[in-house]
Amino acid sequence: MLTRLFRTHSNIQLIIVILGSLLLWCDGFYHGQAAMQGNELSPLYNLLFSWTFSNGVLSTIIAFAFVLGTALLWNYILVNDGLLPRNTYMPAMVTIVLLSYIPMMLRLTPLMPATLFLLMAIHLLLRSGPHDKAYQDTFSAGLLFSLAAMTNIYHVVFIPLIWISLMLYRSYSIRVWIISVLGIITPVLYLAFYFYWNDHLVSQLQLYIDFFRHFRFLAAFQPQQLMTYIIIGLITLLFLPAFFRFVGRLNEKLIVLRKSSMVIVWFFLLGFFSLAVIQKDLLINGSVMLFGSSVFISSYIFAIKKKQFAELLLWLLLAAIVAGKILLPLQ
């Protein structure tokens, strides 16, 4: 039943996505959790959204808009680049479900605006890949990667994706590589000037020094509630066959689609690697890898002939999420 809904008219699918996301977030609107504070190493988030921190309902509405907007943008990117069938909103719905699986995620976090910048950068990489002289897109992608890292410090692990994509598309022009670096450092120079102008440059540099001085791998791994493990287990059970099927069939695709698919695979792998460097709030800061997971799961559901297994897992996942909203604490 769930998979059949996304074979109907695109307008009906869009209504289903909006209504489904509202249902998943209804308890978030009711509780109106306070926004998550930003990291001092990435000041852009606090600069943009500090005015919402004292109003839980307002920040939750903004968070919902980010989740719905990024899911629809991600759906557009995947469909527009031919990675998934056209006239479907299943990737958007799967993304929203994955991003709403525990109550603590139903609030405004630095991950949301940072991921929006990140997806826009990936869209530019996929668009510029087939063209050898897409200098403007390459510069803009580097700038967006840098803005994402300034909003959420852990998004810095995705910056190498710009050079990985250049290698995948066999773009070895020195000019393109230099332009990508210029795009990355431009926001950094503006931020440095901002701190210098406000006499905070030295103290900000000290924060970065202290971060690396006390840095530990796997520092954020902490015991979780049993219900959280059950939900993550169901997501993993649905993800694993989808991922191996997606990767196993890359050679069957056209060259352009194969390279674009590899960019998505590397996007997921970098997100998985980021779990090791996150210092706190693992479930929230690590959820960016769920965007890549939504691609594999959606592709798997479309590709398999016998959809009963995927249908069953989707229903079990939704049931577990509903149970989690009752049993899991907000914080």
Image: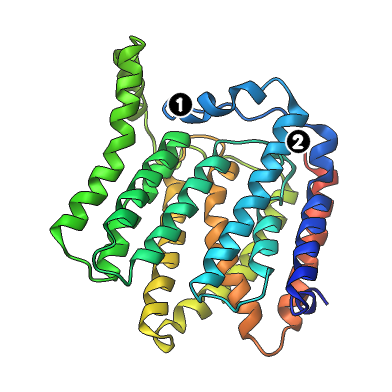
Question: Which of the 4 quarters of the picture holds residue 312?
Answer: bottom right
Q: Is residue 299 visible?
A: yes
Type of the residue with mark 1: Pro
Type of the residue with mark 2: Leu
Position of residue 310 measured from the top left corner of the image (x, y, whole percent):
71, 77
Position of residue 187 measured from the top left corner of the image (x, y, whole percent):
34, 35
On the picture, is 3 further left or further right than 168? Answer: right
Up-down relation of residue 271 to residue 263 (above or below): above
Q: Residue at x 62, y 30 (%)?
A: 36
Up-down relation of residue 33 to residue 132 (above or below): above
Q: Residue at x 52, y 72 (%)?
A: 243
Residue situated in front as seen by the camera: 307 or 126 = 126
- On residue 43, which mark appears? 1
On the picture, is 133 further left or further right than 90? Answer: left
Mark 2 surroundings within 10 Å by alpha-carbon count, few (fewer than 14), some (14 through 19), many (20 or more):
some
On the picture, is 164 further left or further right than 38? Answer: left
Position of residue 78 measured from the top left corner of the image (x, y, whole percent):
53, 68
On the picture, is 275 further left or further right than 66? Answer: left
Q: Nearer the viewer, mark 1 or mark 2?
A: 1
Q: Secondary structure at mark 1?
A: loop
Residue tagged by mark 2? 330
Q: Is residue 105 visible?
A: no
Position of residue 208 measured from the top left corner of the image (x, y, whole percent):
33, 25
